[in-house]
Image (tube, rainbow, N blue to C red):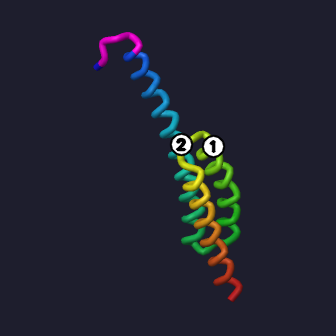
Amino acid sequence: MPNIKSAKKRVRQDEKRRMHNKHLRSRMRTSVKGVLNAIAAGDRDAALAAYQAAVPVIDSTADKGIIHKNKAARFKSRLNAHIRALQASAAA
């Protein structure tokens, strides 16, 4: 535990930031899981709606620096590929 006043303040700030970042990361993961659950259920319309709701959450998380922008792009690309595969299998 720090003894210096400024170090104590940094500990408080770091914990506050960590909790805020944890909330944002959790929100993003929940939105991604919603898309994956809809895909697993085979419901294309629900998956598409969940994907459209998840994209701004993923982008917001990346903009805030919680995740890297390439990771956000990878999440969106993979989810979109799953939805397209679901759509192709439904059409066939």
Q: Which residues are magenta?
A: 2-6
Question: Quadrant of residue 52 in the image?
Answer: bottom right
Query: Is 80 drawn above or below residue 2 in the view shown?
Result: below
Q: Nearer the viewer, residue 49 or 25?
A: 25
Residue 1, horizontal then vertical, whole percent: 28, 20
Q: Quadrant of residue 34?
A: bottom right
Q: Which residue is mark 1?
A: 63
Coordinates of residue 87 in the picture (x, y in percent): 68, 78
Vertical side of 74 occupied by 28: above or below = above
Disc 2 target residue: 66
Q: Amino acid at mark 1?
A: Asp
Location of residue 57 in the rendering, given as x and y in whole percent from the top left corner: 64, 48
User: What's the residue type where badge 2 is placed?
Assistant: Ile
**29 and 64: which is toward the camera:** 64
11 sits left or right of 69 in the view: left
Label 1 Cα crowd, 10 Å radius (few <14 / some 14-19 / many 20+)? few
Q: Is residue 34 left or right of residue 53?
A: left
